[in-house]
Image (cartoon, rainbow, N blue to C red):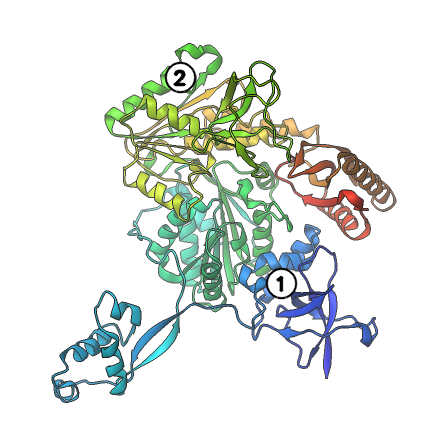
Amino acid sequence: MVTRVEVALPVPLPRTFTYTVDDPAPAEGSRVRVVFAGRKLIGWIVGPGSEERDAGQVRAVERVLDDQPSVTPDVLRLCRWIARYYATPLGVVLRTALPAVLSRSAQRAAPVKTQRRLRLTAELPTLTERESVFGRSRRQRELFEAIEALEGSAAVARLTGPMGFSQALIRGLIGRGLAALEDAPVLRDPFADLPVAVPQSLSLTPAQAAAVASIQSAGTAAQPFLLLGVTGSGKTQVYIEVLREVVQRQGRCAIVLVPEISLTPQTVARFRAHFGDVVAVLHSALSDGERYDAWRTLRRGERRIAIGARSAVFAPVADLGAIIVDEEHESSYKQGEAPRYHAREVAIMRAHLARAVCVLGSATPSLESFENARTGKFTLLRLPERVEGRPLPPVRVIDLRAVPRSQRAGRGILTPALVEAVEDRLRRGEQTILLLNRRGYATFVQCRDCGHVWQCGECSVSLTFHRARRRLVCHHCFHEEPAPVVCARCESSDLSFLGAGTEQVEREVSERFPAARIARMDVDTTSARWSHHEILARVERAEVDILLGTQMIAKGLDFPGVTLVGVINADVAMNLPDFRASERTFQLLTQVAGRAGRGPAGGLVLVQTSLPDHYAIDAASRHDFEAFALREADERREPGYPPHTCLANIVVSGTAESAARTGAEAAAGWSRDRIRTRHGDAVRVTGPAPCPIEKVRGRWRWHFLLRSAERGPLGAVCRDLQHGYELRAGRADLRLVIDRDPVTLL
């Protein structure tokens, strides 16, 4: 007997597909291998199959790959919601929710690393027995007793390596019937040897205690909590106390999301200090095998706390009791490709479905979360002061317009005030952080004679000069070419390298402070495995005097030795053509300012800017989130941007500019007609227009916006586009992207 089942496949088609499988049918969430359009693909059974098609038209599943469903029922239910909300095929969502090896491996079981071990099979409890068995075989007896001391089993590589036993001794022990070889599974855990800090028994501040009590007393159907705490106010300690109740007292499981891979080692060390080896780590810097092993320990219930970046929200934990989203405002929680989910929103939904507690924490919450707290959709909890009563560092704004370039150090990067402050910290043996959220050496190269600027041929952006490699690089498509010596247009050798990046800051700082120990932290210096951890470990050991870098040094780091933070240029992102530009600037300045003054020596923040009167910089200098949030929300009210409006960005791209424009116009027109006939005035269409960055990776991009006061009608229109609109690709290879709740419109 065969049964029809519905299979979700990771293909860009908004439907599932019917196949047959031998009885008894596998449970929902099980992986199967099928033939689809001439290719062998791995899909997931998601329900009973359709009976509408003739039996001769329904193909059979080639192979069932799971004995136990790889997608747990609660994760499958979550993925169904994501597919519907973000208008993405269910198979694409399921592929994202699982370790890569489970979506690629056509084997029945994903690869598990094994280790050759020697295990004792007999006991010799008395001295007489040992002397009788081994006689004069002293080394063989030593081998037996060494394995005995290692709880009866040891890796062969360890025995023959550091411990110095030969293969002949091992064979002899086996020949006596005292031991046997076996292949034992090995857990690939890159954090296993991470130094674990001794947990500090800190007494909670009154505000921390009130926050913990409020969260712990919440019912199982509680609304999300927004923990608004200034930098250094001890939000992590609140998380730990919440998890202590959920994991240790209630015996349930938890998920902790962090926005940056660089934060993971520090977070893991802190949580393992309190909860031991029940903590598993899931993030993209792990190898496929390491990620699969962590996933497997969670799936089996061997570990009960999952910590990681965005995708850890899909951790296969059973009986979920709490989800923590640290630095909930971070844009890195938004997935940049299908499914374009936001981990914060998915975490809220997963907690709701599991009847678990959800805590969102930040010193600078997103305007959407703050609005939800103001209107009562979230419960607002405040931590208004730093732990141990330490003050927030004073922030001094330096107006670059009032400081002539001739008075600045190097090529005008460092003002006298910042130079003097750094010198003072160096004399006192204290540490400094310098932030510039732009990597490379120079932002662009221009010919002084004819004005030519080197552009990327595949993207409508200028190429960035990287001095160490003598290359021009596109930070969108990663195209590289040699740095120019003469202008290709007029053959002039008079070239300007304009706009400073972190590489140039590093050079200027090293020349100005030659005795200082300097570390740079950006994408270029952290591409190697664990390079984030190595740099930050040096800072923690006080082996670095000046840490400079991009936004990855601005958040979550806790170094008491840092007493000075300098922002090289606060205006880098301010004038980007994006509605969140001011919000990002405020968040970045506030977060990096919070790295100063966490120790008893206090701290100081210097912000260099040409826009000292801008409300984002003014509010950041006063550590006043609410003043900024109210002003920014008011600025967005009339254009109709979040938090006042629900938004979807619809992007049409193609290899020809005219085709992309025509395709966007047709899709926008179709959307207007569909909205008029089905939704009245509940959804508005704005555009189309060229994207701010018109061309990326050889594809021209046009977009239009869908706006609605409510999520329901907006979601319906997005699904209409997904299911009902057919984009005529033609020779221009047109593609349509639905980005719901976008974090950027660039």
Q: Which residue is mark 2?
A: 415
- Residue 405 lies, in percent from the top left, at 44, 12
- Residue 404 lies, in percent from the top left, at 44, 10
Give whichever of 635, 470 is nearer the camera: 470
Give whichever of 598, 421 is nearer the camera: 421
Looking at the image, is 546 positioned above or below residue 267? above
Which image quadrant: the N terminus?
A: bottom right
Q: Earlier in the sequence, mark 1 or mark 2?
A: 1
63 left or right, relative to 568 = right
Could you tell me which residue is drawn at 43 percent across and 64 percent down?
303
70 left or right, relative to 189 = right
Could you tell me which residue is drawn at 72 percent across and 40 percent down?
651
Could you tell me which residue is drawn at 75 percent across and 71 percent down?
49
Looking at the image, is 287 positioned above or below residue 641? below
Q: Which residue is mark 1?
A: 76
Question: Mark 1: which amino acid?
Answer: Leu
Question: Mark 2: which amino acid?
Answer: Thr
Looking at the image, is 57 positioned above or below residue 499? below
- As helix, strand or loop, the secondary structure at mark 2 comes to loop
144 left or right, relative to 232 = left
